[in-house]
Amino acid sequence: MEFGHGNGWNRLELESGSKQLVQMLSGRQQLTSELDVIVGDILHIAGLLEVKFQFRLSNNVAHIIVHWDNLVETEATRL
């Protein structure tokens, strides 16, 4: 979020595999004492932007990025 804010982005969509964290960030669940400082920092920065927090059921995007990176690296070594 800091990177986006620093580069003039004003709308972000952030995903997490932690449903509990997304619910806390979205105000649908009470903060736990273990996470209140971290969540507070995230919400402070999010207040400078329009941010949508979203829970994702799987790591499909991460898997695609890793696969693509491995493919690019393999192709580069063939050259």
Image (cartoon, helix red, strand yellow):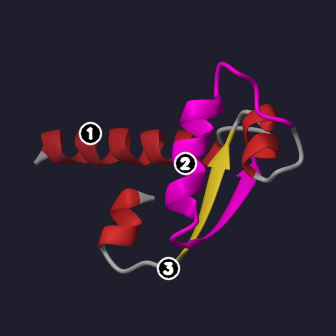
State the extent of the magenta-drawn residues as a range.
30-55
- Mark 1 or 2, closer to the camera: 2
Number of other residues with Cα within 10 Å of mark 1, as a class: few under 14, some 14 to 19, many 20 or more: few
- Identify which amino acid the numbered label 3 is placed on: Asn
Q: What residue would you read off at disc 3?
A: 10
Number of other residues with Cα within 10 Å of mark 2, as a class: few under 14, some 14 to 19, many 20 or more: some
Of residues 67 and 49, the one drawn nearer to the viewer in this rendering: 49
- Identify which amino acid the numbered label 2 is placed on: Ile
- Image coordinates of residue 71 in percent, x first then y, are 36, 44
Q: Looking at the rendering, which quadrant does residue 23 occupy?
A: top right
Q: What residue would you read off at disc 1?
A: 74
Residue 74 vertical placement versus 46 (above, below): above
- Which numbered circle lies on residue 39? none
Q: What residue would you read off at disc 2?
A: 42
Q: SS class of the residue under badge 3?
A: loop
- Mark 3 or 1, closer to the camera: 3
